[in-house]
Image (spheres, rainbow, N blue to C red):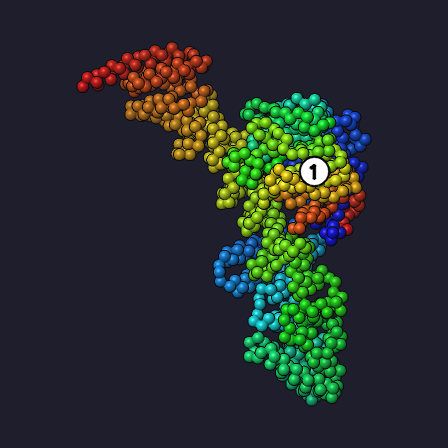
Amino acid sequence: MAEVSNAQIIAIPDDVCRRAGLAATWIGQNKIGVHAYKHINAHSKDVPSSLAPCEVKVHCLRQEVILFEPALRKLVNESNGVFLAIQKIKNSTEDLRPELLKYSKHYRSILRACVENLQDVVEKSTPDKKPTFENYLTIFYNVECVWHLTEILYVNVVPGDVILPQLLEWVRFHFPSRELMASKILAKKSLAADLDNVQYWEAAIGCALHGKLDTVRSLLAMHSKADNPAFGTAENAIRTMPVYNVYGGYSVNEFNMRWKHWQFDLSSQIESKTFSTDRNLELLMRLIVGEELVLWEFSKYTEAWYELLAARLFYSAPCSKQPELARHANHIAEKWRAGRYLDHVILALMESDLHQVIKEIQHMSDNGWFAAHLINLLYNCGRLDIIDKHQINVTSQLHESLILDYASTLMGHHSLWQCGASYFEHCPAQGLTRLQALLESIPLGSEARVNKIIEIARQKHMTNVVTSVSKIQGMKCIRQGRLGNALAWALKAQDGAFATFIADQFLKNYAKHGELECQDLLENLGSCMLISDRLTFLGLYRKYCEFHQTYGLGEFKDAAALLVSLLVSNLTPKYFWSILLTDAIPLLEAEDAVLSSKDTFELLQTVEEHGNDPKFQDKIDLFRLAAARNLARALNIEGCLGDH
Amino acid sequence: MVSVLNTVDTGHEDMIHDAEMDYYGLRLATCSSDNSVKIFDLKNGTQTLAADLKGHVGPVWQVAWAHPKFGNILASCSYDRKVIIWKELGEWTKIYEHASHDSSVNSVAWAPHEFGLILACGSSDGSISILSNNGDTWDAQKIPNAHTIGCNAVSWCPAIEPGYDATAPHPRSGPVKRLATGGCDNLVKIWREDNERWIEENKLEAHSDWVRDVAWAPAVGPPRAALASCSQDRRVVVWTSTDCTSWTSTVLNVFEDVIWNVSWSLTGGILAVSGGDNKVSLWRENSEGQWACISELNKGQGNLNNPEQRAL
């Protein structure tokens, strides 16, 4: 398999490993732990191993992610914005092409900014970091170049499909050196530019190869022999050369006729030695008339085969459409012996082999940024149709897997994870489950981060994550003795069992110290307390304490009613009975009767059931006495009321 | 590109048998033939020894971290036939000792946290025990004679939504507890809890020698379960199933040496394979369902001047 031969081997020196063998375990998303390992088992002798004593080490390895570099942060964040914007428009029924073209250009401007930023960084960086940044620069320059061509060939489809004008633009944009050279020469306004500038002809021919005919004419006008009729004829021939333009008013056929006619005239002028006064001029005119031999001679003035390809199309096949492009590209690339990595990608693009393009760009070392965003754009343009070797269409699987990979990589970063999380939603098959696994594994850290994690999990209805994260936070609070915060987390998690556990802690602390903590929080529980019986009990008991503390008679009555309702509610935990019953004694003995005979019966019944708590033994007689007195008093009053 | 993030010098006196990071990758636990378990805090590339746990009287084979929602809990198993559960309560303390096995305990694994605090242990006495925490007590259940001669590895099935699980008795009863084990009978077995009892659900035969490790892949994406097993027969097998009843096996590769460990990445995409040949290789399934090696880590033969990477 091709993949196997590409596999990278990384070596780490560790003598114990060499002698023993090793074991590896994944740590989270992109790390691996490795240590020396030799298997022994119950049947081996229980003695120190042959390697002891030895230095035992565990190595943690991490996949290097260049996107985590601060200089690339902007690229990651801004492209995320464009990606999300594209997902929004894709449900509209209108023709998306113009919109997508706009977004493609937006991506490119982000890339351009990134490349320019990297250029700055390279200049400012220290010698030891310089090669790294130069490497990044190459990577993103290549990405930009390929993206631009992809946009021309697949996103921005012009009427008539003639690709030459855009192809020339692309070549000019990426190889500006000779045009710069020409403009420097022109700026000097010399009358014998060829004599003053050694690079005069290189500039002129470079511009001709890029189809910059106006610049070529301006240069010719500055030649020391510009007055010679040969130059005049040349200038005229170049000026009258028909250049195809979709909006030029001619059909392709008409254009071809005119062009052929012009070409015929020029070639007869060349044959009649019109330009023989100057060898360079003659060569230039032979290039313009479309002579293949001359074209290859001038390849010395180009940096890449696709520059030559553009020139060849310009002078020999100006109306080529995409299928013909593949043929021409193949021919030139082969003859050029193009073998650089970028050459393969560009050739595959021109041959419309998008599957190959996607495969190649995954090796760009940009951690999948390019592959994910480009495939998404092409996918939305409807330009992808990838068939595997079993003739099954795997386009959407491939699309999803590239986006998943990219997003998962971002999830490994302490601040980019939020950006990464936004991609999963657009992966229908695996997105949410993957996001869930990754969200759960983000180290929780600050409260702000925890809240962000919970917010995302809530949006995506991952109650599991909300519960487990809140539980972890709650446990942490309990360890730190912050019961109130722990309770807040339990409520956030809607975790009844956990709330019960915490309410128990509150009540037990009260039983021990006679004081309820976090009154504020408990006071504002509202309906939240219904999540657990124990918490409800706690909430009601707090209210009772509040009544009890205020001495007015009215409150005393309310307190009594609440206490009775707590006693009969079946919510009371076992360890709390003695406290509740003790609380009842002063109410029974209150100056005015606040407990009715019915209430007192209830109290007597509960003391029968629950009064056997050892902590209550010293008070049980007191309780019974108080209850008996109150019963007598209450019956008396109630009897009197009944008389009326 | 892979770089060495940090190297922890464990200070153990003899070989370590297991090294496990906690849930968030911030703490490392190691266990060794020197009978000890150590816990390290890793922060910004530095390590501090947080605890040196002494409680076993034989080599410690494996350690396992419980989900952080239960607090900081670690389980360890040893040649001394014991499983110890440790908890950080201010200091690391032994909170439970499980000593019902008749031979060395080779493997421990915590159940998915959704099920509660539950630990599975595989032993050379051939049985598997399952410890469940009920507040202050631990209940033990046992599967006797699970693997003849011994059980080498245990791994829990992730908590799959019952909607995906054809064998779930009631669609609304919550996820099913499932366990994969590998043993000296060359088998991988799958166990399912059914009415509080553990039953053998499947017996997977593909290995011709002792099975050394089993690893259930994290459940992501379409309803498909995947399981990797490795054996002394030098084979790594990936098992897949769409209903957890019928399983298909794919031999990932036949390696040059015995494979001791298999480990899935967090989202299940990549399998790390390591063993006696001193290599770690990473495997990934492509869109056509074939497994390809995507990278190989090779230790011990590196050149000190160029320790980081060497492209083939």
Residue positioned 62% across, 63% down in the render: A150
The quadrant of the image that shows the C terminus of chain A is top left
Binning the other alpha carbons within 10 Å of mark 1 as few (below 14), some (14 to 19) or many (20 upward) gives many
For image coordinates 61% across by 38% down, the residue present is B244
Between A457 and B245, the residue placed more toward the observer is B245
Where is residue A279? Give x, y as percent.
75, 82
Observer-nearest residue: A13 or B153? Answer: B153
Q: Secondary structure at mark 1?
A: strand
Front-most of residues A235 and B165: B165
Image: B299 above or below A155:
above
What percent of the width, then of the height, locates residue A341?
71, 60
Q: Is residue A642 left or right of residue A155?
A: left
Q: Amino acid at mark 1?
A: Ser
Judged left or right of residue A24, residue B221 is left
Q: Position of residue A533 (x, y in %)?
A: 43, 28
Residue placed most toward the observer, A527 or A40: A40
Residue beneath disc 1: B229
Chain bearing tag 1 is B
Q: What residue is drawn where x is 55% and y is 76%?
A: A247
Residue A377 visible, this orientation? no
